[in-house]
Image (spheres, rainbow, N blue to C red):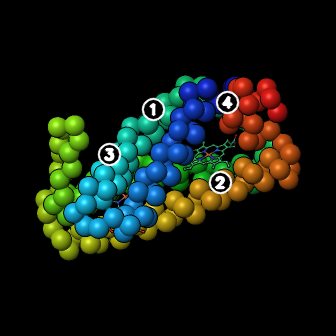
Amino acid sequence: MAHHYHPIAIWLHWLMAIMLAIVCLSMEFISLYPKGSSGRTLMLSTHYLLGLVIVILAFVRLWFWWRSKPVENPDQGPMQKYIARAVFILLYGLMITLPIVGWVDIGLWDVSVSAFGWQLPQIASPDSVMAEELSQVHILMAKTGYGLVGLHGTAALYHHFILKDATLKRMLPRFRQRLS
Ligand code: HEM
Ligand code: HEM
C-alpha cells in the first residue's frame, strides 16, 4: 500500500476542486446576467457541460484510487478514519449522482444544450411539475456538497496547521512536498 496518492489522483483532486468551484459559481452568479443574454447562455452551458465532465473524471479518479490502493494515513485515529471515509464516499456519490440528476432535470425542463455543433442527448421527457421537484433535489444535494467540502477542507487544514501532520502533504503534488 502506497503512502502517497498516485500523482494523477493528486492532480485530478485539485483540478476537480477547481472545476467544481466553477460549476457552482456559474449557477450562483447567474442572476448577474439578464435572461437571453449571451453571458447567461455561456454560464448555463458551462454549468451543464463542465458538470457532466466531472462524472467522467470521478470514474477515472476512482479507477486510479482502486489501482494504487492508497493510503493508510498514520496520522488519523480510528474515529477520524471512519469520518473521513464516510465523507469521501459521500463526496464521490455526489460527484457522480448530482450531475446526472441535473441532466435528467434539464430534460424535464425541456432545455436543450449544445456545444461546438454537438447536441447533449435529452434523457427525460418534458414535465414541469417533476422538473420543479427535481430542481429542489439537485439544489439540496448541491448544498449538502458545500457542507461536506467545507468539513473536508477544514479537517485537512486542521491537520496541517494545528496538528502539523502529513495529511495535507500527501495530497500535494510532489514538488510541493519537497519544498515543505
Ligand atoms: C457536480 C456538478 C454540479 C454541481 C456541484 C451543481 C450545483 C448546482 C448549484 C449550486 C445550483 C444552484 C442552486 C441554487 O439555486 O442556489 C445548480 C442549479 C442547477 N443545476 Fe447544477 N450542478 C452540477 C451539475 C449539473 C449538471 C450536469 C446539470 C445539467 C446537465 C445541472 C443542472 C442544473 C439546473 C437545471 C439548475 C437550476 C435549478 C433551478 O433553479 O431550477 N447541474 N446546480
Ligand atoms: C470540491 C472540493 C473537494 C472534493 C470533491 C474533494 C474530494 C476528496 C476525495 C474524494 C478524497 C479521497 C481521495 C481521492 O479519492 O482522491 C480527498 C482527499 C483529500 N482531500 Fe479533498 N476534496 C475537495 C477539496 C479539498 C480541499 C479544499 C482540501 C484542502 C484544504 C482537500 C484536502 C484533501 C486531502 C488532504 C486529502 C487526503 C486525505 C488523506 O490522506 O486521508 N480537499 N478529497
Q: Which mark is residue 173?
A: 4
Residue type marked 2 = His
Q: What residue is disc 2 on?
A: 152
Residue type marked 1 = Val
Residue 8 x/y as whole percent = 56, 27
Task: Report, in whole angstroms, how far the alpha carbon at label 1 lies from the one at label 4.
Answer: 18 Å
Label whose residue precedes the other's in the sequence (4 or 3): 3
Q: What residue is disc 1 on?
A: 60
**Mark 1, residues whose alpha carbon is within 10 Å: few (<14), some, or many (≥20)?**
some
Image position of 85 (left or right of 47): right
Q: Is disc 2 placed on a helix, strand or loop?
A: helix
Marks 3 and 1: which is nearer the front?
3
Label whose residue precedes the other's in the sequence (3 or 1): 3
Whether residue 71 is visible here, answered yes or no, is no
**Mark 2, residues whose alpha carbon is within 10 Å: few (<14), some, or many (≥20)?**
some
Marks 1 and 4: which is nearer the front?
4
